[in-house]
Image: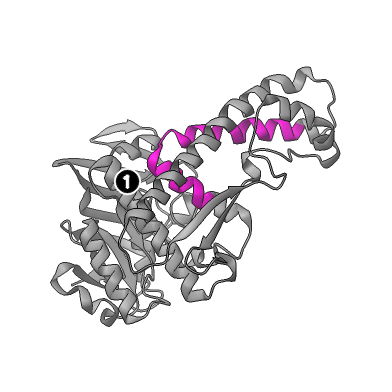
Amino acid sequence: MHLKRLELSYFRSHRRTVVECDARPVVIHGPNGAGKTNLIEAISLLSPGRGLRRASADELMRRPQSLGWRVGAEISQDGTVHDVDTRAEPDHGRIVRIDGKAVPQSALSRIARILWLVPSMDRLWTEGADGRRRFLDRMTLSFLPGHAEATLAYEKAMRERNRLLKDQVRDPVWYRALESQMADAGRDIIAGRAHALDKVAAAQNVAITHFPVSDLKIVFPEGASDFDVHILEQNRQRDLAAGRTLAGPHRADLQAVYRDKGVPAAQCSTGEQKALLISLILANARALKGDLGTAPVLLLDEVAAHLDATRRTALYDEMEGLGAQAWMTGTGAELFAGLGERALHLEVTEGAGESRIGP
């Protein structure tokens, strides 16, 4: 599974960019602000969702033109090449076409699985639980594309229930259908997350790696992971007082402990936290390769930051062993010298407000 061609049109700083590549990793180096992250953000939109920056369609438009943007790609999957196109016009939502046919975003998961690691995730273990839930749900989505539908169904029903709670509606008739929908979708979400963590844990346990292994656990503020319609009914008075739903998978948190040291990830050094994240991404990729027979595409923004030379070399060797097409960014070409001809090396520069790319 890899990109053979990538085309950007009026996407952020890229007015017109074309990259021809093969299955090797792709190294993108250049100064800050040149458009490196914009390039891999475009690739992240070849998967369902809002991409690695969680940007709206209008935010992705090149300024000052504010024309519609387009990301096109040729993706090789098991020897079959698919033409993927996603775009948006001003004040319109994003649309997706695969091989010329309009499809829902969820269909992208049938063509490519894409994992990413970006600098904002370096604070994953020290910031709020919402970021860790998103991380967990992206991991789950990589194994179970249907997880997106369950999450959307749960959030839609919960928004309606929260509106009733905020308005202090007490008639149980108004709640029953919504709580039933939340319970059904919530059970699927909880089961899907547990499945993903089991897969990643198994992949960590069998790997020979230079990166630290973490023990992962999903926890809930109320201490119980059980969730059904009866819990929602029982908690209704408490939720009415709070004006929102206080129990359910939307309250879950992901905990990680550095196994060899027995130290929670939140208490590890910056370098250790980065290494733990890289280890999880690699384990996720190994588990997916075990399921699909092919490694996912990896997007690793500023991946060399906080890694010494030994760990950088170990990362490159592990990616080669995995056989993944990894798109990596960094400010200096020297950070990726250890890859040599094993990777395609590209330089991104900026001039007159436009990103340019070359070998």
109 horizontally vs 163: left or right: left
In the foreground, 141 or 217: 217
How many residues crowd around disc 1 within 10 Å: few (fewer than 14), some, or many (20 or more)?
many
- Residue that badge 1 annotates: 288
Residue 48 visible to an observer of this rendering = no
174 inside magenta stretch: no
Three-letter code for the amino acid on which mark 1 is drawn: Leu
Q: Is residue 149 magenta?
A: yes
How far across and down, in percent of the image, does residue 290 sit?
28, 44
Q: Quadrant of the C terminus?
A: bottom left
- The boundaries of the magenta stretch are 134-163
Q: Is residue 58 above or below residue 317?
A: above
Q: Quadrant of residue 169?
A: top right
Question: Residue 358, position in %: x, y?
Answer: 20, 71
Rendered residue at 47%/75% (across/down): 271
Residue 179: x and y, percent?
68, 25
